[in-house]
Image: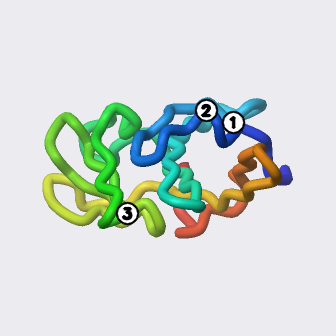
Amino acid sequence: MTAVEVATLDELVEGEALGIEIPGSEIEVALVRIGEEVFAITDECSHGKVRLSEGDVEVEQCRIECHLHGSRFDLRTGQALNLPATEPVPVYPTVIDGERILVDIDNPINNQEN
């Protein structure tokens, strides 16, 4: 699979997560726009199995917080940054093509499998 169009830039509010189901797959990601970058992180906390898109985005630190227990994840790497989560979550490369946002679910940046 090549990169799949999942949203447009005008659908994203900077510093807020948007939960998206990837067309043609069972993968769901939280899309986050920070400045001119868009990040795609699996929309499920590795600890509490809840949607990361429902948590807060910490723009300056480039991370997202799980609303259930407060675990934070780096949007660039998927690494769990504090307990109770200890496992990373997959993050995927994004491409901005004009106004379109594309996500490559076949090549996670951190080589995690969903």
**What whole-number distance in Å separates the C-alpha atoms at marks 2 and 3?**
19 Å
Image coords of residue 13 (percent x, y): 49, 39
Tag 3: amino acid:
Cys
Residue at the image position 77 percent from the left and 44 percent from the top = 100
Image coords of residue 80 (percent x, y): 29, 62
**Label number found at residue 62:** 3
User: Considering only order in the chain, which callout, 3 or 2, is on the residue closer to the N terminus?
Assistant: 2
Q: Which label sits in the foreground, 2 or 1?
A: 2
Tag 1: amino acid:
Ala
In the image, is 20 to the left or to the right of 79? right
Q: Say which of 3 and 85 sits in front.
A: 3
Residue at the image position 62 percent from the left and 62 percent from the top = 108
Image coords of residue 77 (percent x, y): 45, 68
In the image, is 53 to the left or to the right of 109? left
Residue at the image position 74 percent from the left and 31 percent from the top = 23
**What whole-number distance in Å separates the C-alpha atoms at marks 1 and 3?**
20 Å
Residue matched to label 2 = 11
In the image, is 103 to the left or to the right of 20? right
Q: Say which of 97 and 65 sits in front.
A: 97
**Label number found at residue 7:** 1
Instruction: Check if mark 2's residue and mark 1's residue have beta carbons within 8 Å.
Output: yes
Identify the element where label 1 is drawn: strand
Image coords of residue 64 (percent x, y): 33, 51
Q: Say which of 53 and 84 sits in front.
A: 53
Q: Is residue 93 above or below residue 16?
A: below
Q: Say which of 106 and 33 sits in front.
A: 33
User: Considering only order in the chain, which callout, 3 or 1, is on the residue closer to the N terminus?
Assistant: 1
Residue at the image position 52 percent from the left and 50 percent from the top = 33
**What whole-number distance in Å separates the C-alpha atoms at marks 2 and 1?**
7 Å
Tag 2: amino acid:
Glu
